[in-house]
Amino acid sequence: MPLDQPHPRTYLFTLRLWIEPVGDNQGEVRIQVQHLLSGETRYFRAWSDVVAFLLTKLRALNAANRGEGGDDS
């Protein structure tokens, strides 16, 4: 990106990760994602679902910022 162009729009999310016990010495990863501006929070068990959510959320936020429509998350 050329130096004279402004930075692209950025969005802040937090990810919280923990291991949920499910049996004898067994555990499953749990993932919490929060969009800091809106406070919207989602919980996941699979990284593929986290990525899909983030891509959908970013598309909706970018569309809303361009005045193309609402947030469809």
Image (cartoon, rainbow, N blue to C red):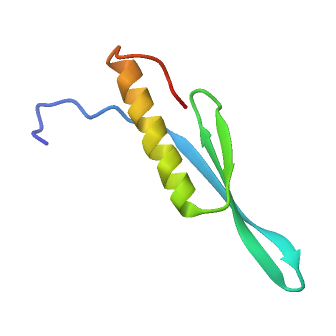
Question: x, y (%) of residue 15?
Answer: 60, 52
Q: Is residue 11 visible?
A: no
Q: Nearer the viewer, residue 22 or 7?
A: 22
Q: Is residue 2 visible?
A: yes
| Quarter in which the C terminus is drawn | top right
**Left or right: 62, with 37 as reference point:** left
Which quadrant of the structure image shows residue 20?
A: bottom right
Question: x, y (%) of residue 18?
Answer: 73, 64
The extreme right residue here reads 24
The extreme bottom residue here reads 25
Q: How many marks?
A: 0
Q: Is residue 28 above or below residue 54?
A: below
Residue at (41, 20) in percent of width and height = 64
Which quadrant of the structure image shows residue 67?
A: top left
**Left or right: 17, with 49 as reference point:** right
Q: Nearer the viewer, residue 34 or 26?
A: 26
Q: Nearer the viewer, residue 13 or 26?
A: 26
| Quarter in which the N terminus is drawn | top left
Which quadrant of the structure image shows residue 38?
A: top right
Residue at (59, 34) in percent of width and height = 36
Question: x, y (%) of residue 2?
Answer: 9, 39
Q: Is residue 12 above or below residue 28?
A: above
Question: x, y (%) of residue 27?
Answer: 78, 76
Residue at (54, 42) in percent of width and height = 13
Q: Is residue 32 above or below residue 17?
A: above
**Left or right: 22, with 16 as reference point:** right
